[in-house]
Amino acid sequence: MAVASLGILGGAFDPPHAGHVALARAAINQLGLERLLVLVVVDPGHKETVASAEARLELTRLAFDRVPVVDVELDSYARTVDSLEARRPDDAVFILGADQLADFRHWKSPERVLELVRLAVAMRPGVPDDCVREAHARLPAPDRISFFHLDPVPVSSSLVRERVSRGESVDDLVPAKVAEAIARLGLYRLAE
């Protein structure tokens, strides 16, 4: 099912992990995307980052280097609507997880976001369908939202940071090049 030619996936990627890569691959394959733009948000307004924007950009490029049709860029806008206004993408979907859909109506200018792009929501086990349906029904333009399936990947950026800080391996959580770069750059370790 071709939903759009361009997909946009934004995040802090602090650090990027196997779940992000699985999400990108699922979106490309199931939505028929010709290109996926991965935006590393310099200063996400809703959470603090640990690594610098430049380090997160390097890690994200390494994480997605084996995924065809992916471009990775820094995004200086803290709010999605501002980034989309600046880019004015044609025929694009903004990709997010089902858990994020419930909060979408609290984003800055959700109506405008839905005018600029459609949403593609990754459905995965663990997020109750009734919660997703309820959130979907409350949005200003529910017809601008499509869904795709994502197999569960039990990983989060906070889990990666936690393991690194304890000196544990993250080889099962992040691509090998990302694990190597985290070690090389000395990221996420406890201050000595």
Image (cartoon, grey):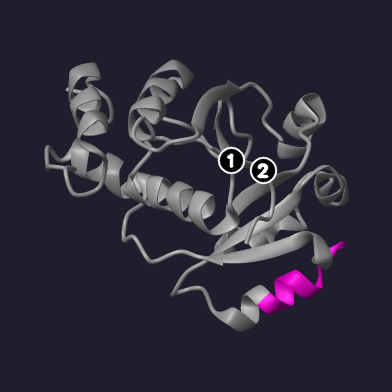
Start-end of magenta stretch: 133-141
Of the two numbered discs 1 and 2 on the same chain, state the one appearing first in sequence: 2
Mark 1: amino acid:
Glu
The residue lying toward the viewer, choosing from 41 and 96, is 96
Q: Identify residue for label 1.
A: 34
- Would you say the residues marked 1 and 2 are in contact, meaning their CB atoms lie under 8 Å apart? yes
Where's residue 16, x and y in %? 38, 38
Q: Is residue 192 above or below residue 145?
A: above
The quarter of the picture where residue 74 lies is: top right
129 displayed left or right of 60: right
Where's residue 191, x and y in %? 23, 24
The stretch drawn in magenta includes residue 138: yes
Dot 2: element? loop
Res 104 visible: yes
Where's residue 14, x and y in %? 41, 35
Residue depicted at x 59% and y 55%? 31
Where's residue 61, x and y in %? 40, 26
The stretch drawn in magenta includes residue 16: no
Mark 2: amino acid:
Ser
The residue lying toward the viewer, choosing from 190 and 39, is 39
Residue depicted at x 50% and y 27%? 72
Q: Is residue 139 above or below residue 183?
A: below
The residue lying toward the viewer, choosing from 87 and 190, is 87
